[in-house]
């Protein structure tokens, strides 16, 4: 499946996405606030294989999208929406190659995930979490109309040798009723 926005095409991952994914996933600056990484080649390969495997899930609970530029086809990052078993709630995740930060690409992709979640999957609530120091990520949530619901203090164990021992976390969420009243960005699916 494929979702188009003004500047982006969100599409399914393919085996030959390895180099573009590994470029950001193996870079410590790029994964500073993530729970994974920096990846070695094996970890990136497993990530792509897992995404491809999930494309055949039935019912489908995990949607991982490669974020590509409409203009060139270049893969610039990844995002996903992950349904809980009851299929009424889902979480979001995202990462963009650092070359493409601060150009509004992720709010464009995230808005589309919300639209997909509420309008196609008929979800009730969508949420996302991030390291409380990750300004870029929680700004994406705010730009999409998500509300800060929780600030957990030192609840998340950091990666050994990379992070502090304990990290704090924000949770943001939006309900379908709020989406309907806030909905701003038009998309073509
Ligand atoms: C977080 C991220 C997805 C933001 O995407 P983006 O397309 O750059 O978002 P925007 O261009 O809309 O920027 C959002 C805001 O954050 C700021 N920002 C973006 N990336 C930033 C960064 N890495 N560091 C500091 N500020 C950042 C922007 O200047 C903007 O600020 P403003 O709202 O005050 O104007 C991107 O920085 C990224 O991929 N980071 C690494 C991976 C990551 O942390 N993923 C999230 C894990 S929860």
Image (spheres, rainbow, N blue to C red):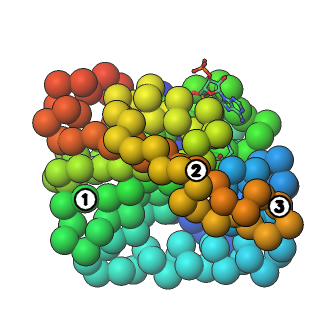
Q: Position of residue 187 (x, y in %)?
A: 35, 33
Q: Which residue is mark 1?
A: 89
Describe the element under mark 1 as helix, strand or loop.
strand
x, y percent for residue 4: 43, 40
**Nearest to the observer: residue 154 or residue 120:** 154
- Relative placement, left or right, of 173 versus 70 is left
Q: Residue at x 49, y 81 (%)?
A: 53
Q: CA distance from mark 1 to mark 3?
A: 32 Å
Mark whose residue sits in front, 1 or 3: 3
The dot on residue 159 is none
Q: Earlier in the sequence, mark 1 or mark 2?
A: 1
User: What SS does tag 3 mark?
Assistant: loop
Question: What residue does disc 2 label?
Answer: 168
Q: Is residue 186 above or below residue 154?
A: above
Label 1 lies in ligand 1 vicinity (Cβ under 8 Å) = no
Report which residue position mark 3 lands on.
162
Residue 73 visible in rendering? no
What residue is rendered at 59% in x and 55% in y? 154
Looking at marks 3 and 2 on the same chain, the residue that comes earlier in the sequence is marked by: 3
Q: Quadrant of the N terminus?
A: bottom left
């Amino acid at each position: 499946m494929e979702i188009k926005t003004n500047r982006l095409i969100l599409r399914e991952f393919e085996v030959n996405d390895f180099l573009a994914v590994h470029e950001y996933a193996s870079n410590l600056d790029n994964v500073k606030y993530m729970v994974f990484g920096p990846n070695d080649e094996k970890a990136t390969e497993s990530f792509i294989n897992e995404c491809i495997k999930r494309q055949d899930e039935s019912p489908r609970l995990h949607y991982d999208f490669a974020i590509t530029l409409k203009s060139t086809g270049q893969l610039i990052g990844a995002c996903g929406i992950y349904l809980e078993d009851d299929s009424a709630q889902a979480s979001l995740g995202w990462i963009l190659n650092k070359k493409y930060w601060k150009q509004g690409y992720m709010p464009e992709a995230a808005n589309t995930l919300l639209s997909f979640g509420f309008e196609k999957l008929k979800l009730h609530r969508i949420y996302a979490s991030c390291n409380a120091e990750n300004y870029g990520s929680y700004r994406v949530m705010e730009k999409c109309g998500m509300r800060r619901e929780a600030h957990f203090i030192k609840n998340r164990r950091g990666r050994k040798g990379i992070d502090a021992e304990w990290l704090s976390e924000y949770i943001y969420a939006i309900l379908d009723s709020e989406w309907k009243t806030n909905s701003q960005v038009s998309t073509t699916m």
